[in-house]
Amino acid sequence: MKTFSLKSKFVFLPLLILLYFVFLRPSKILSQTPDPTTISSRVNSSSDDAEEAIGSGSVGLSSSDLELGAEGSVLQLVGMRFNNLQIPQGAIITSAYIEFEVDESQSGSTYVTIRGESSDNPVTFVNQTTNISSRPVTNTSISWDNIPPWTVISEKKITPDLGGIIQEIVNRPGWISGNSLVITIEGTGRRTAESYNGEASNAPLLVISFLPSGIPTPTPTPTFTPTPTPSPTPFPEGTIRFAVIGDFGTDDANEARVANLVNSWNPDHVITTGDNNYPDGEATTIDANIGKYYSQYIGNYQGSFGLGSAINRFWPSLGNHDWHTITCDILGCTGAYFDYFTLPNNERYYDVDLGLVHLYAIDSDTGEPDGRSISSIQANWLQTKLVASNSCYDVVYFHHPPYSSGRHGSTTTMRWPFASWGADVVLNGHDHLYERIDVNGIPYFVNGAGGASLYTFDNLGTLPPEATSIVRYNEDRGAMLITATTSDITYQFYNANGVLIDNYSVVKDCSAPSPTPSPTPTPSPTPTPVETPTPSPTPTLTPTPTVTPTLTPTPTPTPTPTPTPSPLIFNPTDDASIYKANPSANYGSLATLEVDNSPVKNFLVKFNITGVNGSQVISAKLRLYSVGSSNIGGYFYSSDTNWGQSSVTWNTAPSAGTFLGSLGRVKKGIWYEVNIGSYITGDGVYSFRINSTSTDGGDYTSGEGNSSQIPQIVLTLN
């Protein structure tokens, strides 16, 4: 018979208490992080808030309110200056927001972008042309999209977290406690807030929470829980699954959300498109920014967050923020990045042969000692590697995108002939958003939404003729999951809530022997993937094109300059808006073409193409000049040509045919282009019908409008 005495209870009680505090209350004994300090500053003079009319540049300081977005039909840039901010230089910003008081009731679609002035201690606003827009701005911006209705006068409204903007400002070498800072807001739609001149006690209020420099950042919410080193999930034999994250190393709630998403997939490998360790790639931040969330994939892991992986399954590429603390000399490069990771080759650029898939990490930074031009040592290394590859899928990835519609735009130096050398896909970051671009039939992805503050698509319409933006998304952070099998490869982007945003597959037979590299310098053409679009603000596209493996050129081709062909430019023979609410009315004489979903309006435009004379059309663009702003510029379809400008109505208009492309957010006073390359095949009459799912529709100049702004088709022939 077992007995348990009072004495034995006292023997075990200290042990039980110890176990309780070690295992059940670890945060209380391990976390010594102090509570953040919170300060606030309200706009406190009429020269500390101002509005600038975009276009004319006129600045006003005496308005009784602040229109975020537009005042009437005029888009505005709003500036606000906050004074005497008692924040030490280099403090860790844990959160920040601006509180507004509602001055007018409004509910229309409104999208704005928030930035800071990149100055140590900015001066007050003055009534001088472009006094707000001429100021330097921060690299960091925050999108405040689809702002909920403001319908209750005097109700308080707050912005999204502005911590990234404030962090960039207080990290400036010239920042000192007590300085001022400026925040600017611009966009479309309208939300009206109280100003200093309207009601000083309810002018905009900036609230900032921070920790002193050198204090570790508290655990973010939602809480991230590192998982043990997993064995890859069993999938059909020959399957390789890998995640792609970019611009992610922020050690905050957004990185935690993306990491939880990635770890839920249990991928075989993780690759990154750069900016792994914000803000400056330092040794003091690298483990919290990377290992805290992804240690289970890192080989030879020496950090504090778990045991790491028995073999390395984490394959990063360098970003510009990682380069901030890297130094190089004739012996090589040193920095926290190289101390932390164990990677092949020189660790700046390298390849990993996984059998079915071959990975190529490239360094696109200007600091790369082996260069980043098409004729550089690094480019020659990549070309040689691609030529020698026996893998079915060759995946190239690096930080700066050769093609992007985002805020940074395209890095043209990185437009190497990847497809000609043998690459199947190119993955990039740098712009904090997601975009899929078709470049002559090869998918390029911009995936920089792994944690850092999101960017807007500020460079729509700037891609060259060979590139077409297919899917764009910047409403939330997220990551890509790529699944390669012996019959196809699928690229998926999920937002941090696990919602599938984009799904794109390419069929490729990997069971056949790899093709022998061809000495022919021109590769065989790759068929352009066929899209099955779902026109919505966050489309999920599921095309399945068949792609012929690209033949590889000689390792050292010598480019031969060819004369640039002169484009052919055509204006419309007919164009007209059609209104569903007035189905029998003709609007062919209007100076604008309108597209809207409330009330429903479409427009038609028709062209007579001549002079092709059997030549190959290598580029075709439909160009429109925007005279209004909209969050969706329209969805473009082919249509029958049996209609006339002076007689067409909603009832008689041809229906929409094949989907050709779309425009995202458009602004007044800018030309926009839609790639219609496959539709224009030669001489003939071509017609288009344009519709929209947005209740804040777009307007464009028609053939009856300003002669310098009427629609165009621009053709480039071979």
Image (tube, helix red, strand yellow):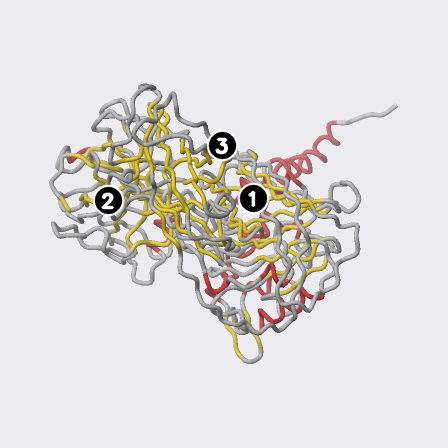
Could you say which is closer to the camera, residue 182 or residue 447?
447
Q: Position of residue 466 (x, y in %)?
A: 49, 54
Relative to 65, say whether 549 is above or below. Answer: below
Relative to 141, say whether 495 is above or below. Answer: above
Q: CA distance from mark 3 to mark 2?
A: 40 Å
Q: Which residue is mark 3?
A: 657
Q: Amino acid at mark 1?
A: Ala
Q: Amino acid at mark 3?
A: Gly
Q: CA distance from mark 1 to mark 2?
A: 32 Å
Q: Position of residue 83 (x, y in %)?
A: 22, 48
Could you say which is closer to the camera, residue 639 or residue 633?
639
Q: Which residue is mark 1?
A: 479
Classify mark 3: helix, strand or loop.
Answer: loop
Could you say which is closer to the camera, residue 269 or residue 521?
521
Q: Position of residue 478 (x, y in %)?
A: 53, 42
Could you say which is closer to the camera, residue 577 or residue 188?
577
Which residue corresponds to the image point at 54% horizontal and 67% vertical from the top-left?
335
Residues packed near mark 2 inside 10 Å, few (<14), some (14 to 19) or many (20 plus): many
